[in-house]
Image (tube, rainbow, N blue to C red):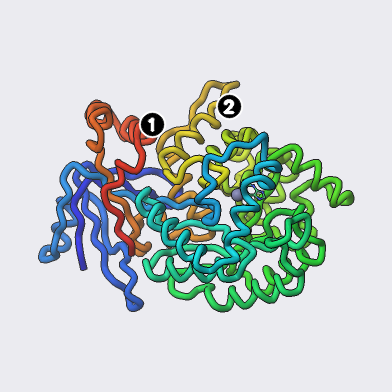
C-alpha cells in the first residue's frame, strides 16, 4: 500500500471533475500486481482512514489521471509535421513510404521504443494505436508496452488494395495474421488487440467481411479504423461502394459497428450516421490537431453531444501535430468554437480534460478501468507541476476556480508540465 498527498484531480463516472486542493490517493496492488485506487479524497479524511501508511508528499503538484490517446499511429512518429495538400496526397507522399520501412523489425523496435518514451514524457498512459501491415510491427509495439507494464491497445493494419507494393497484404494472409496476433497479445496482462482495417478504400470487400467475422468471434477485441475525414476520401468511398448509403454504412454492412469499434475523425457524417453509431455503441476518436493540420474539417461537438455519441480525443500523429494532450485539448477548444459559434458557448476545460481521460476510456469500453482515479480503477497517473514555467506559475496562481486552473494548464501546458508518470 502506498499513499500520495498532493492536489488531486479525479472524475466521477458521469464525467464531473472532482478536485482537492490538499488531497490523498491511496493505491494497493491486486493479486496480479496491478496497483489500484483503494481510497481518495481530502487529505485530512483519507489520512485518518489509513493511519500507518507510507505517504509520498508532492506539495504544489497536481496528481491527475494519465491521459488516454484514442487514436495514434506509432509508425508515423517520424513524419509528424509533413505538409501536404490534404489527406490523400499526404498518405501517398509521406505516410506509405514511412510505413513501408516497418518491414524491418529492427526499425519497428527502435521506433516503438521512442514512441512509448515520448507518450510517457507527455503523460499519455493508454493509447489505441495503428501499427503497420507488417506483423513484426505489432510484436515490436506490444513487446515494448508489456515491458513498461502499460495498458495499450493496437493491431496490424489490413490493407489489400489501393496500396503500394511493400504495404499491400494478401487478403487471406492478412486475416490469418490478424487472428494469430490477436491470440498472442489480446488480454495478455494489460494489453488489448484491435482489428485494424486502415479505411474502406484500402480494403477489398472480402477483407472487410473477414474482419467483420473476426470482430464477431472476438467481441471484446477492438475494431479500429478511419471514417469521414476528408471530402476526396468520402467521394472515393462512394465510388468504390456505390450501394452504401454513406461511408459509415460500408462498415455497417460488414459487421464493423459495435461496442469497442473506434473510428477516427467522423467529421463529415450526418444525423443518420450519428444515430447508427450511438445505437451500435461505436465510438469516435476526435483528432483536432490533425484535422486542422490536414485541413480536414471541424468535428461538431454540439451535434455529437445531442446524439449521445461516444467520443474522446486522439492525437492522430503523424497527421496530428503533437503527442501532447495539452496541445490536443487546446486544438479541440478551437474546433469547438467553430461548432459553438451560433450560441457563443465554449467547451468547458473540465470537459476537454474528461474527453482525454475518463471520457476517452469510456468510449473505448474501459470505463471504471482507467482514466478517472475512481476507487478500484487502475492507478495510472501523472504528476503535474503548475509552476513548470514562469508564465504557468503566474497564471495558475491567479486561477479563481478549477475551470480557470485547468484552462491555464490547457492553454500554456506541454511536456514541461508533466513532472512524473506513475504506471499502475
Ligand atoms: N486515413 C487512412 N489512413 C490514414 C492515416 O494514416 N492517417 C489519417 N489521418 N487518416 C487516414
Ligand atoms: Zn489516423
State the residue at coordinates (40%, 44%). Answer: 16
* Residue 292 vs residue 113, the one in the foreground: 113
State the residue at coordinates (57%, 48%). Answer: 285
Q: Secondary structure at mark 1?
A: helix
Label 2 sits on residue: 338
Callout in the foreground (1, 2): 1
Label 1 sits on residue: 411
Decide which of tag 1 and tag 2 comes sooner along the chain.
Answer: 2
Q: Where's residue 394, x and y in %? A: 23, 27
Is the C-beta of the residue carrying label 1 under 8 Å from the nearest atom of ligand 1?
no
Q: Are marks 1 and 2 in contact (CB under 8 Å)?
A: no
State the residue at coordinates (54%, 27%). Answer: 337
The answer for how far apart the CA atoms under marks 1 and 2 are is 17 Å
The single residue placed furthest to the left in the displayed view is: 52
What is the quadrant of the C terminus in the image? bottom left
**Label tally:** 2
User: Is 248 left, or right, of 367 in this rendering?
Assistant: right
User: Is 294 left, or right, of 402 in this rendering?
Assistant: right
Vertical position of residue 386 compared to residue 173: above or below: above
Kindly tell me whether residue 305 is visible in this rendering: yes
Q: Where's residue 142, x and y in %? A: 48, 68
User: Is 88 left, or right, of 244 in this rendering?
Assistant: left
Vertical position of residue 57 compared to residue 424: above or below: above
User: Is 256 left, or right, of 404 in this rendering?
Assistant: right
The local crowd at label 1, few if under 14, some if 14 to 19, many if 20 or more residues have their Cα within 10 Å, is: some
Q: Where's residue 122, x and y in %? A: 37, 48
Q: Secondary structure at mark 2?
A: helix
The local crowd at label 2, few if under 14, some if 14 to 19, many if 20 or more residues have their Cα within 10 Å, is: some
Q: Where's residue 112, x and y in %? A: 46, 61
Amino acid at each position: 500500500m502506498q499513499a500520495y498527498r498532493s492536489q488531486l484531480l479525479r472524475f466521477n463516472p458521469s464525467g464531473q471533475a472532482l478536485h482537492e486542493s490538499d488531497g490523498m490517493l491511496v493505491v494497493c496492488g491486486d493479486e496480479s500486481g496491478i496497483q489500484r485506487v483503494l481510497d481518495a479524497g481530502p487529505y485530512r479524511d483519507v489520512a485518518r482512514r489509513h493511519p500507518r501508511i507510507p505517504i509520498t508528499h508532492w506539495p504544489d503538484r497536481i496528481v491527475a489521471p494519465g491521459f488516454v490517446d484514442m487514436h495514434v499511429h506509432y509508425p508515423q512518429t517520424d513524419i509528424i509535421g509533413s505538409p501536404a495538400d490534404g489527406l490523400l496526397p499526404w498518405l501517398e507522399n509521406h505516410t506509405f513510404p514511412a510505413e513501408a520501412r516497418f518491414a524491418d523489425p529492427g526499425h519497428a523496435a527502435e521506433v516503438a521504443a521512442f514512441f512509448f518514451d515520448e507518450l510517457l514524457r507527455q503523460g499519455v498512459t493508454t493509447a489505441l494505436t495503428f501499427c503497420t501491415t507488417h506483423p513484426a510491427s505489432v510484436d515490436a509495439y506490444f513487446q515494448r508496452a508489456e515491458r513498461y507494464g502499460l495498458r495499450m491497445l493496437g493491431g496490424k493494419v489490413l490493407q489489400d488494395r489501393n496500396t503500394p507494393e511493400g504495404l499491400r497484404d494478401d487478403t487471406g494472409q492478412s486475416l490469418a495474421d490478424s487472428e494469430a496476433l490477436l491470440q498472442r497479445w489480446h488480454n495478455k496482462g494489460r494489453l488489448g488487440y484491435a482489428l485494424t482495417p486502415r479505411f474502406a478504400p484500402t480494403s477489398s470487400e472480402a477483407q472487410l467481411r473477414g474482419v467483420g467475422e473476426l470482430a464477431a468471434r472476438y467481441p471484446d477485441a477492438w475494431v479500429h479504423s478511419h471514417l469521414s475525414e476528408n471530402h476526396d476520401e468520402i467521394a472515393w468511398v462512394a465510388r468504390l461502394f456505390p450501394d452504401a448509403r454513406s461511408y459509415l454504412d460500408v462498415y455497417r454492412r460488414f459487421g464493423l459497428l459495435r461496442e469497442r469499434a473506434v473510428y477516427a475523425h467522423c467529421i463529415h457524417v450526418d444525423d443518420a450516421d450519428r444515430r447508427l453509431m450511438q445505437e451500435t455503441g461505436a465510438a469516435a476518436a476526435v483528432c483536432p490537431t490533425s484535422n486542422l493540420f490536414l485541413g480536414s474539417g471541424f468535428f461538431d461537438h454540439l451535434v455529437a453531444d445531442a446524439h449521445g455519441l461516444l467520443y474522446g480525443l486522439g492525437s492522430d500523429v503523424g497527421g496530428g501535430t503533437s503527442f501532447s494532450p495539452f496541445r490536443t485539448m487546446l486544438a479541440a477548444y478551437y474546433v469547438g468554437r467553430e461548432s459553438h459559434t451560433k450560441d457563443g458557448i465554449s467547451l468547458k476545460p473540465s470537459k476537454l480534460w474528461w474527453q482525454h481521460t475518463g471520457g476517452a476510456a469510456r468510449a473505448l469500453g474501459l470505463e471504471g478501468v482507467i482514466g478517472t482515479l475512481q476507487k478500484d480503477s487502475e492507478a495510472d497517473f501523472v504528476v503535474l507541476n503548475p509552476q513548470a514555467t514562469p508564465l504557468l506559475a503566474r497564471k495558475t496562481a491567479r486561477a479563481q476556480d478549477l475551470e480557470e486552473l485547468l484552462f491555464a494548464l490547457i492553454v500554456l501546458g506541454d511536456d514541461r508540465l508533466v513532472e512524473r508518470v506513475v504506471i499502475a
